[in-house]
Amino acid sequence: MHPLFKFAAVLLLSGAAALTASGAVTLHVAPNGNDAWTGQDVQPNAEGTAGPLATLAAARDAIRALKSRGPLPPGGVVVEVAGGVYELAQTLELAAEDSGEEGSPIVYRAAPEMEVRLVGGKVVTGWQLVADPAVLERLAPAARGKVWQANLKALGIAEFGNVASGGVELFFNDQPARLARWPNADFVNIRDVTKEVPETSHGRTGSKVGNFYYEGDRPSRWRGEKDIWLHGYWFWDWSDQYQQVESIDVDQQLVRLAKPYHGYGYLPAARYYALNVRAELDEPGEWQLDRETGTLYFWPPAPLEEGRAMVSALETLATLTDASHVRFEGFIMEAVRGAAVKIAGGTDVQIADCTIRNTGDIAVDVRGGKNNAVIGCDISNTAGGGISLDGGDLATLTPGEHLAENNHIHHYARWKRTYTPAVAISGVGNRIRHNLFNDAPHNAVQLSGNDHLIEFNEFHHVCLETDDVGAFYMGRNWTQRGNVVRYNYFHHLGRHGGGVGVMAVYLDDWASGTTVYGNICFQAGRAVLIGGGRDNRVENNVFVDCTPSIHVDARGLGWAKSYFDGSDNTLFDRLQAVDYRHPPWRDRYPELLTLLDDEPVMPKGNVIARNISVGGRWLDLADRLTDATVKIEDNLVDVDPLFVDRAKEDFRLQPSSPAFKLGFKAIPVENIGLERSKLGASRPPADAAAK
């Protein structure tokens, strides 16, 4: 930890706060505090007239009062929060007036070696064992006598949201409880769809109307249920959606879904499962909510008195709007319905060394501003993704310099299953480095914009539930250039379905101008896919047991010709949306100046050089492409590259490797992944990555 944050014994400053040896003022917050006190003391005094504050909001207000009396001290202000659980009654809102200064930051931090929880939920009380005969009759026999109920309205919770949006959720012993579902694991499949509005796409024929036939008679148990939802991949294995059931005809085995229907339609054999069905509350750890009465039903996996049941209530724990030089450090943040922290604008805002879990959306949302960062956090069990970084100016190509570094983001996207990545990066000039991403249904890094850097990250066991997906993904824009994906380790990716497959680096639908350099891909599906794009460089990578290592196609000549025949002008509209004919675009990306006059349908300018490929399959050039269009040179294919220890996944090269004679440069493998010497809320053991 930086010496600025190692605080020494205190001196009094204006009778309102403590001054550390570093010059920082310290305010104290504690569960036994009082917002009428000064916050200068760790414990209340004997007279009960001074002591710690009770809330972060009071500490914020005390800092405002301190600033009104003069400039910040050279070391800034530290709000040190004692161990305990802080259930926030409302979101902590920080604005420009709550900013620190360069060299004098405002730091909200957990007291050293103490567990400090900032909670957006409420502990559920008033549990009663279910005794109503009508409810018991509906429950599965195995659940009777084991399901408890509580009234959320009695806790002051009146707005529940719905299954599709998330809304209220239940957590038990710091883990998400599972909304009652059938089947309890995996999916079932549509038997057939009704034919009144047929939908055909890419050779698949389904229906645009949400009526379908099911197999078996399980839904006959659901008669009288009022709030049934289905979650499914209704047409494509990369597009999921929650749909409410309008009615079920058990005689015809027909489900009618409520509008709005899924945009792509419904396909025979598509997979789905049912949710919030009280009759399916049949295993420990499951819950169901009657939104009309506010009654929560729960089969606890352990005795209620031995655990803690909590429901999410607050939308967000903290918002920072145009605040600068502010840092949150060392907290556990949990049990909100939306993002835990939202940062809009400002400079040098940091969320560091925190555990962020059990959110109803992502963990941290950064929009606008400059040089804001999420560092050393453990992020898990988010309903959506992990971090969103959006900053920089596209018109001027000015970088935002936002950063996601040294975070472990895992078991995310548990509710919003697709396109909710561990890190979403957009704008210009932001960075994702030294993170570990694992255990998720869909992608890990999703990119739009220009000049971003993704480096030294480890990806494993992502893309587990979906098809036509990349651990790293970008696409459908010629202008999003200057992005670099280098020195990452992709391994043991998902293998769902038999369609397009899973990619490590997915340059989809004409993604262009990207450098893919020095990455290691092991058992990573179609490791790198260039989907019609131009001016991409795939160099100095190691591919082991990938099928293929690299794929390049000219999809605009075939199934995607609608993008070039005038039917769909997306690519051309996005090109015209940027001022590529004038500086700085003209100077930064000169290839755009001639693109429209140089067979834009063809994937020109791509280079595949000095890569190593062993096992699996090396290269697929689709749509009759040849090395006359794609430059391919100095690659080592199906020749032993002399790894240090392939069996132990040590893909460093021995000094005598034949790859070095082709110009291959050693990959700094030792620098990939989490940096254990730096901040980190939690760190997996060295051998934690499942093999």
Image (cartoon, grey):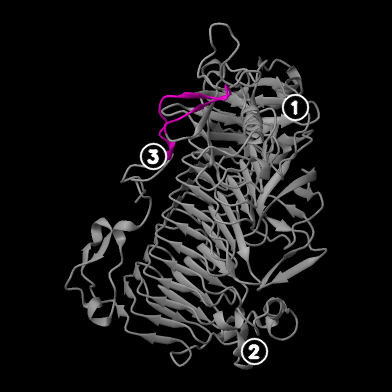
Q: Amino acid at mark 2?
A: Leu
Question: Would you name the residue on which mark 3 appears?
Answer: 3
Which tag, 1 or 3, sits closer to the chain's start?
Answer: 3
Relative image position of residue 165 (x, y in whole percent): 71, 44
Q: Amino acid at mark 1?
A: Ile
Judge the density around disc 3: few (<14), some (14-19), many (≥20) Cα neighbours within 10 Å: few
Q: CA distance from mark 2 to mark 1?
A: 57 Å
Q: Is residue 261 above or below residue 121?
A: below
Judge the density around disc 2: few (<14), some (14-19), many (≥20) Cα neighbours within 10 Å: few
Residue 596: assigned label: 2
Residues shaded magenta: 2-21
Magenta span has 6?
A: yes
Relative image position of residue 172 (x, y in whole percent): 56, 27
Q: Is residue 643 above or below residue 591?
A: above
Magenta span has 341?
A: no
Is residue 537 found left or right of 129 in the rendered image? left
Q: Residue at x 45, y 67 (%)?
A: 485
The answer to whether residue 600 of the structure is visible from this angle is no
The reply to whether dot 2 and dot 1 touch (C-beta < 8 Å) is: no
Question: Would you name the residue on which mark 1 appears?
Answer: 157
